[in-house]
Image: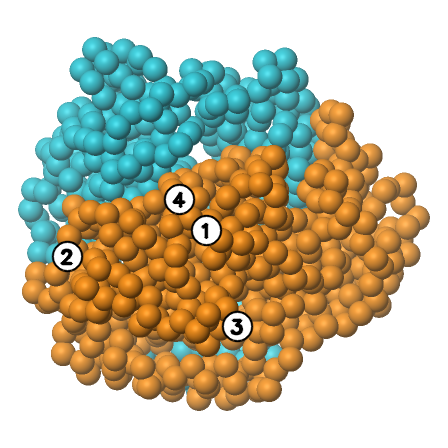
Chain colours: A cyan, B orange
Amino acid sequence: MMEKFKNVAKKIIDSSKADHTEIFLYRVKEDNTRFGESRITQNMAKDITYLTIKVHSGKKTGAVQVTLSEDLKIGELLSRAMDIAKSSVEDPEYVPPVEKQDIPVISRAFRETEELPPHKKAEVLKEIFEDAKKKNLKVAGLFTNGLYQYGVFNSNGLEAYYETTMASFSNTVQTESSSGYARDQAEDVRNLMPKEIYHTAREKALMGQNPRDLEPGQYDVVLEPLAVADFLAFMLWTMDARGADEGITYFSGKLGQKIFDERVNMYSDPMSPLNPSIPFDGDGLLLRRVDWIKHGVLENLYYDRYWAMKQNKKPTGRPFAVIFEDTQKSVGDLIKQVEKGLLVTRFWYIRFVDRKSITITGMTRDGLFYIENGEIKYPVKNFRFNESPARVLANLIDIGKGKRVVGEEASIAMYMPALLVKDFNFSSKTEF
Amino acid sequence: MKELAQFFQDVAKRENIEYADIRIGRYRIRDLFFQDLSPKAIVDEEKFGFGIRVLYDGAWGFASSTKVTKEEIETVLKRAIEIAKASSMVRGDYRVKLAPEPVHVDRYITPIEIDPFSVPIEEQIDLLYRVNDTMLKVKGIVKTFSHMELRRRDQVFASTEGSLIETIIFTSNAGYTAFAVGNNDSQSRSFQDYPLNKGYEHIKNLGLLENAERIANEAVMKLYADEPDEGIMDLVLDPAHLSLTIHESVGHPTELDRVLGYEANYAGRSFATPEKLGNFKYGSPLVNFVADNILPGGLATTGYDDEGVECQKWYIIKEGILVDYSSTREVASILGFPRSRGSARADSFASFPINRIPNLSLMPGNEPVTPEDLIAGVKRGIYIEGRGSFSIDQMRLNFQFGGDMFYEIKDGKKGRVLKNVIYQSITPQFWNSMDGVTDERFWEPRGFVTCGKGEPTQIAQMTNGAPYARFRNIKVGRGRR
């Protein structure tokens, strides 16, 4: 596909009369098997390639995006993009396209994942549904296999290409009074274990039956890696240098300061085996390892190319796939340290309440348990939290073993440990 | 497109399947986005393709393609059948049945005065530039965003039952936000939530430029505002704000697929279960919710839904009682309803249509009541304008909302500006606490073009209209830790 993308891009760039031309190609070939009430409710296949052409005339830019087809009308698209550029205003923040770089061509694609036939997925689900039926449980979820290809090319000679496959399985198992959730993903479907994922969710659901009422308040909490990923995603989104420099975000004036517990280390590195990811950003800029938080110190903020140029810094690229350094302690080891507290499986519907303090809100979901004297005692009804990741990372009790997870909010893979946190703020309760 | 749809009907009828439909769609979107005076995105998009849905042995299969030819239609149809056969392997005792719907051969076009794509793009770019320029001239404003999104969707739907429906839907939307910094704080204020299925005349009538300085000034006012007292107090909410509470606490819980467990893994379920139909006191007697997919300008006003069901108007909550749901042909059939409520919509030709919130509105009252009348009845409370933070649990009970602009109400009068206000409630408690509503003069159709649901997530649009309304004894807090 690299060659096909390159040929499409070359034809367009060669035909373009613009000062600069950029081509972005993204193909998603994906089969999604969705299930609810222990049956398949939607079973879908798609294969779409999106082509974006961006042209620059002086400091003016215009862009068109289309679905790639065989009768691609290159001349027409270029002239539409150029008309838009000419109609636009000069961009005071204009930065020319990325220069040619040595971007490694990486494929993390597995044929077995791309070509997983629908009946194979149905066979796995059949066993799961039968087990659920025997135990009077209901299962809902999503079983996806897909191939994803990205290409960025420009008239400066930039060629950036990446491809990966991904198989993922998520499920929610329900009893009359509770639910349990688990998900996992793998580039190679042979490393994905749907039945084990189902068993994890099933155990949570069975443990969670007949939850008790508990009053909201501040509790020590053990957050499982999935909960940590969604919770911290909101902070990571605000770690741009521009927002900080302009005084809008929590990180204003904090660069170089120790703001978190000294055990907090967070970095991104596309080449890390812990959490490999696309090695270039949306502009085609090569992404290298960047330490964002080191021993609790804010080491770096995200600089895009314009803000880096303006502030005389090097652009970092946006951290796509963060790694939070972990320990070897299991969730059970963290639970053992809790005198009175809660175990959180997952958060839901997290939203910003206040960006300046990174206060966010959300609900617990699919498994909340009361811990006493180092043991899980009983399930409890769900809570709403109003809390800041900044406060949480400054109030850590301990860090557990990490896991590569994809949260519901973050939607990109992050390597996150379980965390034991002091005085996590739950502000209200709900009825289930 | 119509000829290809008829070709599909011919070939699909030859297959050994229960039902099939096709949607061939061409979507044009013009997206304009400014950050300060920098045009960050000026993009013209055009996407073209088709999706085929097949019912075989009581189970669904769906496949799509961007190669719009007769040969590809035959190939994709066979792929959808293969997928449906896989689904049928695990359907157990359940068989998908479709609620009946008359065969429709029709054409529907959004009534517009000005085609948004006929307006020179220079004019649209200039408008957004001037909006941001105006806001940036206000002292204290450090950052501004403005956007405009213009859409045209051409779609042909055809089914093996014989329906053949052409639709052309226009949507116009624009808005902006100013960020102020000072007094050791950062605050924002937005001109928000005005999408409608209308032509460019809607953008011209919005008063974008006329309101820019006011919006920026209000952002600065919030920097120096006090935080609210915490406690139990009354709220008066404006239509823009209410559209979001309606969306989250009434629209989503009354989607029948969610009620029946189809969204249990992601978007969640609902407390509004079928045994409550006709007897559950969802709100006070003043609370009337009407779903209206024939509402002029409504974002779900599309003539027909994405499984060929004609758009309708119906009560979901009548005088406080839950009386109906939104539904698709499949889920309507599960509860034995005679007809789908026409709420199956997909975000593209490549997506399977799912149960979506219709144009759902809180109806105005019959008595002549103004917003000032509502405020006059509050001893201690807060008046909230616009949308801010929002979150609700997966059964749609415990929610927390913020807002975009807040004023204290003291002894019946609107007073000082407040900031960082949040309130929490449980859905039926909240709607049962509503004791005042303005009349139709103050009813506004506010909408969403970013409603996410389903896996993989699809984005849909709908209008949630409202008058001003008053709520008693709500838990108010401060939204900053």
The picture quadrant where one finds residue B419 is bottom left
Q: Can residue B204 be seen in this view?
A: yes
Q: How far apart are marks 1 and 2 (CA)?
A: 30 Å
Q: Where is residue B173 in the image (x, y as percent from the top left)?
A: 47, 73
- Callout 2: SS: loop
Which three-letter amino acid code belongs to the residue tagged 3? Leu
Label 4 with label 2: CB-CB less than 8 Å: no
Which three-letter amino acid code belongs to the residue tagged 1? Ser
Along the line of sight, which residue is nearer the eye, A127 or A156?
A: A127
| Residue that carries the numbered disc 2 in the rendered image | B227
| Residue that carries the numbered disc 1 in the rendered image | B284
Q: Earlier in the sequence, mark 1 or mark 2?
A: 2
Label 4 with label 1: CB-CB less than 8 Å: no
Along the line of sight, which residue is nearer the eye, A21 or A66?
A: A66
> Is B45 placed left or right of B184 in the picture?
right
Closest to the camera, between mark 4 and mark 3, is 4
> Is A222 placed left or right of B396 in the picture?
left
| Residue that carries the numbered disc 4 in the rendered image | B429
Q: Position of residue B181 (x, y in %)?
A: 14, 67
> Is B178 placed left or right of B106 in the picture?
left
- Callout 4: SS: helix
